[in-house]
Amino acid sequence: MKKLFSIIAFIAMAAVAVAQTPEEIISRMEAEMAKHDEKEGLAMTLEMKIPILGTFSSRNYTLGDKYRIEVSKDGKQTITWSDGQTDWNYDSEKNQVEIKKHEVKEKTENEGDAKMFNGITDGYDVKLDKETSDTWQFLCKRSKSNPDKDAPKKMTLVVAKGTYMPVSLSASVSLMTITMRDLSYGVTEEQVTFNPKDYPNATIVDKR
């Protein structure tokens, strides 16, 4: 009898999942993300695939105005911390930390902002491309009526079943393919604050 009820429950859950439209699933994803605010902080991995140059990957942590970006390439690691006024840049090859005044740059959604996950259905034609037992994969094509001609022509969004949280978002921008993945909430002050005690042998170059 238990087995029969399990089968019925599974079929019912499957029927509910099938009944959901891509717009409803993505709307639920946005609602789940909206439950978290900037006070929690956000961490994500950002990958950029550039022809000839290859693939660059970074792990990004943000908490309010503070952030930390870790980049590894060919055995070399660079880490940047910023509090919105001062930047600390660590170069593992030089074993050096350079301190500079923070330069305010215009931020775009292509730099790995979680806001890129919001309003995906606005200006895009969305369809379910693939489905597994754990995820939905959506193909988002820019609509002809989309007034933003600089918006990516195509994006691929993967959403986790059960949690409705985004697994990844990939977009083609110019010659680059940008992927944001491994999102997690909960970043501490220690993760986004440079601590000289962690680099006791590094040379400090203060250019402020």
Image (cartoon, rainbow, N blue to C red):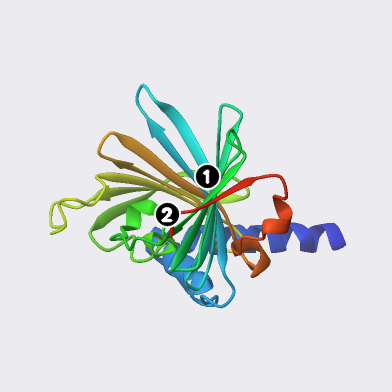
Q: Amino acid at mark 2?
A: Gly
Query: According to the image, label 2 marks what residue?
Result: 112
Say few, some or many: other residues with alpha carbon within 10 Å of mark 1 (under 14 / 14 to 19 / 20 or more): many
Q: Is residue 10 visible?
A: yes
Image location of residue 52, percent across then percent down: 36, 21
Quadrant location, the N terminus: bottom right
* Circle 2 SS class: loop
Where disc 1 sits, the SS reads: strand
Q: Nearer the viewer, residue 133 or 155?
A: 155
Mark closer to the chain start, 2 or 1? 1
Q: Is residue 199 left or right of residue 179?
A: right
How far across and down, in percent of the image, does residue 57 sit? Answer: 51, 39
Can the viewer see residue 166 in this picture?
no
Q: Is 19 on the left or on the right of 106, as rendered?
A: right
Residue 25: x %, y % from top left? 46, 63
What separation in Å lies between label 2 and label 1 (alpha carbons)?
10 Å
Asked whether the beta carbons under mark 2 and mark 1 sit within 8 Å of each other, the answer is yes
Residue at label 1? 58
From the viewer's side, name the closer residue of 181 and 192. Answer: 192
Q: Nearer the viewer, residue 66 or 22?
A: 66
Query: Closer to the camera: disc 2 or disc 1?
Result: 1
| Mark 2 neighbour class, 10 Å CA radius: few under 14, some 14 to 19, many 20 or more | many
Which residue is situated farthest in the right direction here?
1
Q: Amino acid at mark 1?
A: Ser
At a point 58% along the width and 35% down the height, the residue shown is 94
- Residue occupying image coordinates x 32% and y 60%: 107
Q: Where, by quadrant of the figure, is residue 175 drawn? A: top left
Compared with residue 80, is residue 77 higher up or lower down, i.e. above or below? Answer: above
